[in-house]
Image (cartoon, coloured by chain):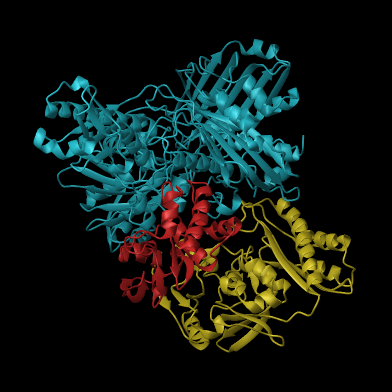
Chain colours: A cyan, B red, C yellow
Amino acid sequence: MTTADYERNMVLATDTDYKVIGTRPVRHDGADKVTGRAIYGADFDAAGLLHGKILRSPHAHAKIISIDTSKAEKLDGVKAVVTSKDFPQSESRKDQWLKDNILASDKALYAGQAIAGVAASNPHVAESALGLIEVEYEVLPPVLTTQEAMASNASILHDSLTTEELGEDTGVVSNVASHSQHVKGDISKGFEDADVIIEREYNTKTVHQGYIEPHNATALWSPDGRLHVWCSTQGSFVVRDSLAELLDLPVSMVRVTPTEIGGGFGGKIPIYVEPVAALLSRKTGAPVKIVMSRRETFEASGPTPGSQIKIKIGAKHDGTLTAAYAWMAMEAGAYPGSPVGAAVQCVFSTYDVENSTIDGFDVVVNKPKTAAYRAPGAPNAAFGAEQAINELAEKLGMDPIELRLKNVAKEGTRRPDGPVFGKIGAKEVLEAMRDHPHYQSDKAEGTGRGVSIGFWFNIGFDSACNIAVNKDGSVNLTEGSTDIGGSRTSIAMHAAEVLGIPVEDVRPSVVDTDTIGFTAVTGGSRTTFATGWAAYEAAQDVKKQCIERAAKIWDVDANGLQMEDGVISSKSDSELRMTFKELAEQLSDTGGGISGSASVNPSGVGGSFAGNIADVSVDPETGKTTVERFTCVQDVGKAIHPSYVEGQMQGGSVQGIGWALNEEYFMNDEGTMTNSSLLDYRMPTSLDLPMIDTVIVEVANPGHPFGVRGVGEANIVPPTPTIANAIYDATGKRMTQLPMSPGAILSVSPE
Amino acid sequence: MPAKTYVQTTINGEHVDFLCEPRQSLLECLRDEIGLTGTKEGCNDGNCGACTVNIDGRIVTSCLVLGVEAEGADIETIEGVADGSNLHPLQLAFLENAALQCGICTPGFIISSKALLEQNPNPSEHEIRFWLANNLCRCTGYDKIVRAVQDAAKRLQEA
Amino acid sequence: MKWIDFEKPKTVEDAVKLLSDSGGNARPMAGGTDLIVQLRVGDPRVNADVVVDIKSIPELNELSYSSSKGLTIGAAVECYKIYGDANVNSHFSALNDSATLIGGTQIQGRASFGGNLCNAAPSGDSIPNMIAHGAVATIAGPSGTREVPVEDICTGPRQTLIGDDELLVSINFPSNGSGFGANYIRFIPRNEMDIAVAGVGASVTIEDGKFTSAKVSLASVAPTPLLVKEAGESLVGETVSEEAIQNAANLAKAAAKPISDMRGTADYRKHLCDVLTRRALNTAVERAQGAS
């Protein structure tokens, strides 16, 4: 391990005039989580609870001829069996696809797809019953990669799927759901103007988010017609709305209580077992709990796609980029909807390139329907684009960071996919990388060094927050964003800052869908940005009411009062002064309690850039890569809670390192995943890593009251190309496929 | 269905008896029969460490122990780590060093780390990483966990 | 998991009786780190109705050493007891190469060399090491006990010559003279918690700069852990040298008959046999020279 003689976790703060923002309090849910008291989805219990299990297709591609559940229903202890027939009639093709991904109707499109659900008095009995369900399949050839799926003679997954070409339905049945294209400038002229051109193809494999907690849900369909679901989800309102749609219920008839959640990274946005538990509960009248196994979590939730990416970049001798072209095909899994659309928005967005064209293809294959995974699509794209930039730097004889700085996007630059950047921190991130002691140091003997940078646009969307003042001067804050990494504390810090009270005096709770206004998912790096903003607005509402109440008590004009640092005072009369706590005590006697609320849908989203510097060594005889030193630099706008921001940067970096080196879905020829365990799906262990150094860069986002951009995602974008560039530096081998496993590295020749 | 087995054991210093089927793991017994849900299931095949408990002074993954094997055993789970309302130095160190994000792996990490510090009060970074390699965390990248264990070692030595 | 019955005999005789009375439907369990998983997933190769917990039988918990009898490790002795044992550390320290890398810390609290051997995975990390040490297994059955060299135990993936009515009691490691050194190394993509892509156990005895005995055994490159006799024999009588070791490594590579799977291609695994045999022999030589 490297011994650091510098600050290993730096914060390059730009605005420090805060009392609460930028401090590092202990999270409000901390004690519960270190004592085992926190209730996660699988911990939920209810009187008369039944246990559900799901029968899954052993085939990657098969017609379902018949399902006979009669023997299973007769097993002692079995209370109910459900299949797709228990769903209401579908309204549309898309609606049917959503249902089929929960319980297949006419076709199984991936190994692991749910076929039937069983509820029984104990999980072992439910499992035994699965073996008594008889399913007759007509097995069809599986299609496992975009190359196979796009071939002219490919086996077709959906007879009803026709290709959408640049927004128009072609009417042609194929596995290509859509082809999009973004054009800026004149790509041919751009390449004509180039002195140096780099062109390569890259391929990546399916990988999983790898959260430690498997999917789970408990449903109780009450005799009054209301459905109540408790589950680990990134978005309780998504679960509510999806259940309502699939089960043909008004949203008001569904209540979702989000439990504590054991990781998600995007993978716990879609629903899987919730509707099955609901159908089983309707049939039995009892609460039904379903918890996926680890194998089911791999084979039947939503991983992020394998992809095929072609990159061509041209530059002048002085390093000016003249043209950039990307062709990206991404596996959607069994139903349309790969993250290629997001990849298109990120692939060249770090750079100000005059001429670019980006083609994106959304392709169905016989694998689980992909879901979001931390900046979905962007790491795949960056694996190609950011290696090409390093190759270009080498050909031009330029430092790879200087080449990036020469072409870096800034405020006013139009992205290749259209939008014009507001204030962004790409340049500041690259400068922080260049100036970092890691980059300034000499490499250790036998190691290679890589760098790269990645972009993620982040999102806004709806968030709501309520704040009620307690008579002891504390406040209860309720919000609807699942807290996966300390967000209830960062949201509470927004309110504490506005009210001028200690964050310990804010009691934040994540509440159910009956109790808070519509709040979108915890995803898109939006939670601290948008729900934090809602807390800011709700606190402003409380503040305004406090000032009005003080004015009423003092019988003065509210316009002459202010509230600063938790003290309400007159701007003109120094005698008129009262703490927030003193006011809180009097509320009931002076007109009643105060509560504030806000619902927001902020538009001032600021994208985030993250860069890495990595040193690796590669065993020349075995091909095994060791990450010797790793630094992550990210512009987060404003770090509300720097420790939790560092945690996001370190976690995203390490997921990226796992993706770079060893993680992959290993599929056999029949389309079955052969490594669906945490033994053989090799996520990094503590022994596989060095400390992950961090630099928080703060280029305040003008679209947020404290400058927040969001931090959860951009950090997973640069690790795969950074490690690839470092391996090249160490070995001379240009790795164009993920994972860069020991055997893969050994099989490639140096350039 | 054949009869359940009667098991007498000690959990977190208290005598606990329960009935279980021989096919039930200790993890299932703790969670479903005894109600101690602080011990988590992440993989059910011994590879993630979320279900780590201490039996008779050794840490094990409770998914790979049968409940009936607990007869006569002395078991420590996450619920027994704090001393009443006083958190253990490791629990404090995990909180103050931000060593958890989602928290699902945290009980396993604390049980494992506690056993490490009991037998090796001043472990090196490598020793910590080696000892904890059977505990997977997907959120933190381990950096802050390793630091929390180092911090707890210091606190325990100073105490 | 399907219903199982659980038995916990206190003597070898009672255990053997339980096994022989069950008509092939009982399985002995030590740490259970393989067996419980196999029962849970319904592995057809382990279709037991009865689990016989053998951890209360004194002979299976023996961990003893004498210069005349060598080292005896009971079939249920957990890995952590092996690497925590003073005699192992003084006289058989290379066994720790396996004991410290089977699973992680938690698995080492339950898993045993005996269980590893009976599970008979081609990748069993203790088996090539035991073979390289010339270990002999003691097996009890209805008609008494028998002794079998470890290299003969495994007959196929998850198959052994231990009968359904027999019980592995212990494994004996003969005392080594001076000039003995051994090593087990495996290649895994991670640094812990992984199945060997390939593994090599090697032992050597060196006198006056020459090999007087040597053994090389491989993991994960054949249906069973493999003793490559010719690799060891090629060294005997040779002066310790890079060439001699490379020659043995070539023979080990030639003997490997791996398959391609998610853990590695056949070619890669053969290549690793060369690399790992060289490295294991070099470490064994260093240890031998340090010991003499």
Q: Nearer the viewer, residue C280 or A224?
A: C280
Across and down, in percent, residue A674 comes to 55, 51
- Residue at 70% over, 24% down: A198
Residue B128 at least partly seen: yes
**Quadrant into which the C terminus of chain A falls:** top right
Coordinates of residue C186 in the picture (x, y in percent): 68, 60
Q: Is residue A598 above or below residue C57?
A: above
The vertical placement of A584 against B35, above or below, is above
Q: Give whichever of A409, A266 is nearer the camera.
A: A409
Seen in the image, is A306 located left or right of residue A556?
right
Question: Relative to residue A467, is residue B75 drawn left or right?
Answer: right
What is the x, y in percent for residue B52? 45, 62
Q: Quadrant of residue A75?
A: bottom left
Could you say where residue A678 lies in the image, as x and y percent from the top left?
A: 52, 53
Any part of residue A153 in sight? no
Q: Quadrant of residue C124?
A: bottom right
Q: Which residue is drawn at 81% across and 69% down?
A: C232
